[in-house]
Image: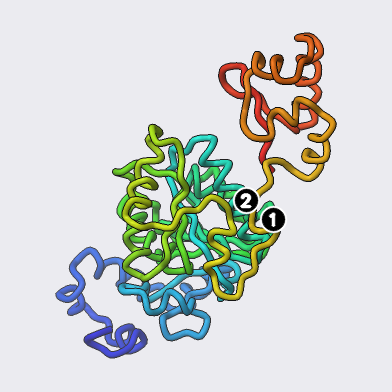
């Protein structure tokens, strides 16, 4: 681009001399692409339903364009939008608490019209995407590979649902690009760059998530962190950020009130259970006992006053109705919706 002035001029002038500029390996790849021709490349993109956007194209995300080292070329499958957006990131090694909160906060943000951006990774990313979809909202996944190489493979159905429901898959890597380890730190600047703010759910101090937080700060994004148990490994980075001045997020309204043009829905608060469950709570001692936190069988016996046999039967029925779920240590908790 610097030598020839434009991508089209560089393409037309491409020759063996280019190896001195880009190196032997890159030259070999570019030579293959030149030999295939633009028509073949365009057909490959069209066959995958992928659009290629340059920095100068009108459809290129406005938030991302001024970001330092913004991708010269962005591949998109689905629909991008300039509506308010929040990036939700965190550890692949999530806990049930982190997973539930990522789902609930993403759900409430999406219900208020906010686009949820994440990286389609296992753990917190997956929970955030699913939470947005549960609210019939929009979510965008930024991949560290080509859009025809969805990673992790077990999230392929999720990726398809994101596109089908009006969201988008985004990558700076061309079709066929594998999910190589060094791709993911690079894609993190796009995750934060597509959003107005970033929310960190769970991460250890040495987590790769730190790079996304750093990009967000460099890009001038507001960083939020969810507090957790102080002795949990996943609370290390959120606590560090909170000490350093990050905004505390306890519910979606903490973020919504900071986004221009967005009004919190139901105060942005996630109810501990679905409306049907909340209605049940007024007359069901078991559900009422579990509204605030999970409890063991023995704790439920003491709080509800039910006989052991009656409590066991009630717990079984509530499990079958998917109102509660069994957890480790013979504990029970409400299913988060």
In this rendering, does residue 156 appear at all?
yes
Q: Quadrant of residue 173?
A: bottom left
In this view, the residue in front, 286 or 60, is 286
Q: Disc 2, disc 1: CB below 8 Å?
A: yes
Residue at image point 41% right, 81% down:
55
Q: Is residue 162 above or below residue 321?
A: below
Q: What number is the disc on residue 4?
A: none
Specify the quadrant that holds the N terminus: bottom left
Above/below status of 299 relative to 170: above
Q: CA distance from mark 2 to mark 1?
A: 7 Å
Q: Which residue is mark 2?
A: 131
Residue 148: image location, x then y, percent? 50, 58
| Badge 1: residue crowd in 10 Å (few <14, some 14–19, many ≥20) | some
Taking the image as shown, residue 229 lies to the left or right of residue 295, namely left
Within 10 Å of disc 2 (Cα), the crowding (few <14, some 14-19, many 20+) is many
In the picture provided, is 9 more to the left or to the right than 134? Answer: left
Residue 200 image point, x, y percent? 44, 52
Q: Secondary structure at mark 1?
A: loop
* Residue positioned 40% across, 40% down in the render: 235
Q: Is residue 284 above or below residue 194?
A: above
Query: Image quarter for residue 37?
Result: bottom left
Q: How is the image coloured?
A: rainbow
Q: Secondary structure at mark 2?
A: helix
Taking depth in this image into account, of 170 and 25 the one nearest to the observer is 170
Residue 135, label in figure = 1
x 44%, y 44%: residue: 202
Q: Position of residue 308 (x, y in %)?
A: 75, 9
Q: Position of residue 32 (x, y in %)?
A: 34, 69
Q: Quadrant of residue 282?
A: top right
In the rendered image, the residue lying farthest to the left is: 20
Position of the C terminus, as image quadrant, is: top right
């Amino acid at each position: 681009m610097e030598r020839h002035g434009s991508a089209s001029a560089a393409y037309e002038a491409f020759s063996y001399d280019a190896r001195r500029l880009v190196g032997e390996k890159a030259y070999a790849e570019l030579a293959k692409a030149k030999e295939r021709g633009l028509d073949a490349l365009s057909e490959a993109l069209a066959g995958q339903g992928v659009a290629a956007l340059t920095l100068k194209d009108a459809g290129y995300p406005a938030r991302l364009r001024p970001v330092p080292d913004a991708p010269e070329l962005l591949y998109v499958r689905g629909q991008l939008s300039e509506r308010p957006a929040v990036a939700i990131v965190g550890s692949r090694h999530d806990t049930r608490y982190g997973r539930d909160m990522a789902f609930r906060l993403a759900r409430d943000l999406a219900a208020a019209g906010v686009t949820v951006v994440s990286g389609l990774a296992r753990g917190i990313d997956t929970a955030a995407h699913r939470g947005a979809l549960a609210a019939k909202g929009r979510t965008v996944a930024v991949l560290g590979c080509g859009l025809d190489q969805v990673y992790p493979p077990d999230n392929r159905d999720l990726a398809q649902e994101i596109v089908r429901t009006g969201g988008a898959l985004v990558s700076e890597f061309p079709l066929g690009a594998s999910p190589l380890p060094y791709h993911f730190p690079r894609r993190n600047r796009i995750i934060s760059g597509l959003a107005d703010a970033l929310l960190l759910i769970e991460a250890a101090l040495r987590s790769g998530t730190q790079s996304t937080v750093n990009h967000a700060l460099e890009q001038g994004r507001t960083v939020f962190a969810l507090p957790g148990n102080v002795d949990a490994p996943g609370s290390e980075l959120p606590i560090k950020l909170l000490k350093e001045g990050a905004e505390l997020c306890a519910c979606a309204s903490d973020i919504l009130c900071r986004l221009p043009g967005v009004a919190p829905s139901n105060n942005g608060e996630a109810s501990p259970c679905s409306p049907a469950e909340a209605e049940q709570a007024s007359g069901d001692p078991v559900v009422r006992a579990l509204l605030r936190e999970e409890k063991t069988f023995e704790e439920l016996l003491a709080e509800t006053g039910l006989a052991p046999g009656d409590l066991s039967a009630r717990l079984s029925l509530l499990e079958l109705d998917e109102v509660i779920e069994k957890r480790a240590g013979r504990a029970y908790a409400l299913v988060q919706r």
